[in-house]
Amino acid sequence: MFDCRNSIAALPLRYLVLLGFTKWELGKSNNLSTLRRMSPRRSYDQYCSAARALDAVGDRWTLLIVRELLAGPRRYTDLHADLPGVSTDVLASRLKDMERDGLTTRRRLPPPGAAYVYELTERGSGLLPVLEALGAWGAGVLGERRPTDALRAHWFALPLRRALREAGVAEGLVEVRLEEGNFHLCAGGGGEDPVYGDGSAPGEPDALLVLDAETCAALSRGEFGLRDAVRDGRVAVTGDGTAAKALREG
């Protein structure tokens, strides 16, 4: 029987590269056992910085992976769980592409974890203002939640950062509690530090916000400001930090 794998393995390296094969693994018998095909790099071939940027982040799922990694290092299984709808093959391909383009790195955690995690590089973290601007631009089409829409509590982290800034809160650690789950966020900063994280704040938060997903969605859509929501009782604020005082005094 004709074995195409042996035929491909016999091709010179330059032909393998032209075919798009960029990495292969040798089996225990030193024979070529598998060939892993990486998605070929596509380009708009336009001398324009926007086009160059879209070469790197224009594929579906890429910016949503960045959104997840803004919370800090994540394991593959955690990323897959928080990106409902993405196939394992597509996620693996996007992560390889992002590593190739200098947006992410992959490293092994020390024992006892000993798991691989993905994290943003400085270049990847630089996409924070892009995602925030994209979220603000998309607020007008968010609409009401559809029956088929998945939801994770931390997806409200970036819209709430914007709402906090608009309320005059430029810094501080804020914990947010929803029925769907808890998360915490940094009202200011950014850079290479995590912008938000799942669960309770790692330390005493400057403010604790308790609200529901409907109020979060309304804040995301810009229907009212955070100070208005606090004053009207839609958002409960506790804490003695500057952020909590600023929101209560509004």
Image (tube, grey):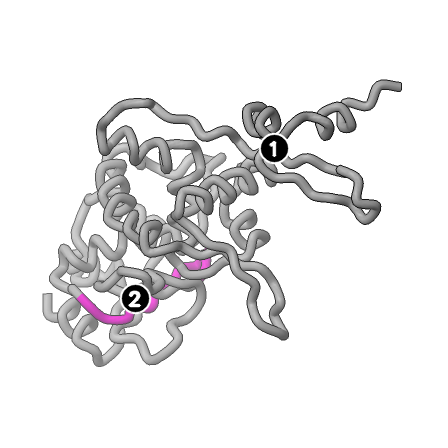
Q: Position of residue 190 (x, y in %)?
A: 26, 60
The residue at which mark 1 appears reads as 37
Answer above or below: position of 227 versus 15: below
Q: Quadrant of residue 187?
A: bottom left
Q: Residue furthest right?
A: 1
Q: Residues within 10 Å of mark 1 (few under 14, many from 20)?
A: few
Query: Does any portion of residue 43 appear in the rendered image?
Result: yes
Residue 172's place in the image compared with 87, above or below, is below
Give the prevailing secondary structure in the magenta stretch: strand
Tell me which segment is drawn in magenta. Answer: 171-181
Residue 177 in magenta stretch: yes
The location of residue 126, given as percent across then percent down, is 28, 51
Horizontal and vertical percent for residue 182? 42, 63
**Which mark lies nearer to you, 1 or 2?**
1
**Corner quadrant of residue 41:** top left
Amino acid on which the number 1 mark rests in the picture: Arg
Q: Residue 87: x, y in percent?
A: 58, 37
Local SS, label 2: strand
Residue that appears at 60% across and 24% down: 15
Q: Residue at (39%, 39%) from the top-left corner?
A: 145
**Amino acid on which the number 2 mark rests in the picture:** Leu
